[in-house]
Image: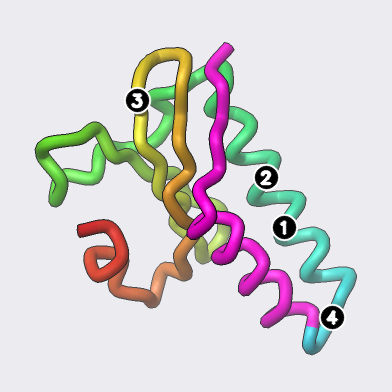
């Protein structure tokens, strides 16, 4: 089982998603955040679940999708994963990951 470590940026991203959705529907915000976390937990057993983010060649950055969100993570080893951020699909993810 891989250990999942959240960066401060990833925590801030998730909080921002929650706050944005909660302005209209706290229950929907809760469902989305739980869904994102559930998707991330899948990485514990399958660290290579996501596709390789090809724009970065010096580190193994990968991403998985949840709804409209891209979850970027760094595969540090088969037993250690660092969540880098959670970005809406309309965002320019290159700006945040380079």
Q: Mark 3 and 1 residues: CB-CB less than 8 Å, in contact?
A: no
* Mark 3–mark 1 distance (CA, rounded to whole Å): 24 Å
For residue 37, the mark is 2
Q: What element carries label 1?
A: helix
Magenta segment range? Answer: 1-22
For residue 33, the mark is 1
Q: What element carries label 4?
A: loop
Q: Name the residue under label 3.
A: 76
Residue 40 x, y percent position in the rendering: 59, 38
**Label 4 neighbour load within 10 Å: few <14, some 14-19, many 20+:** few
**Is 11 placed left or right of 25 in the picture?**
left
Q: Mark 2 and 1 residues: CB-CB less than 8 Å, in contact?
A: yes
* Mark 4–mark 2 distance (CA, rounded to whole Å): 19 Å
Q: Which residue lies furthest to the bottom in this view?
A: 24
Residue 93 vs residue 68, the one in the foreground: 93
**Label 3 neighbour load within 10 Å: few <14, some 14-19, many 20+:** few
Q: Looking at the image, is 80 positioned above or below residue 37?
A: above
x 64%, y 32%: residue: 41
Q: Mark 4 points at which residue?
A: 25
């Amino acid at each position: 089982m891989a250990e999942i470590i959240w960066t401060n940026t990833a925590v801030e991203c998730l909080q921002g998603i929650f706050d944005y959705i909660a302005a209209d529907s706290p229950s929907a915000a809760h469902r989305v955040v739980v869904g994102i976390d559930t998707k991330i937990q899948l990485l514990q057993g399958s660290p290579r679940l996501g596709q390789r983010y090809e724009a970065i060649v010096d580190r193994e950055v990968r991403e998985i999708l949840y709804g409209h969100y891209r979850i970027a993570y760094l595969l540090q080893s088969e037993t250690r994963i660092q969540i880098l951020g959670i970005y809406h699909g309309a965002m320019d993810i290159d700006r945040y990951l380079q």
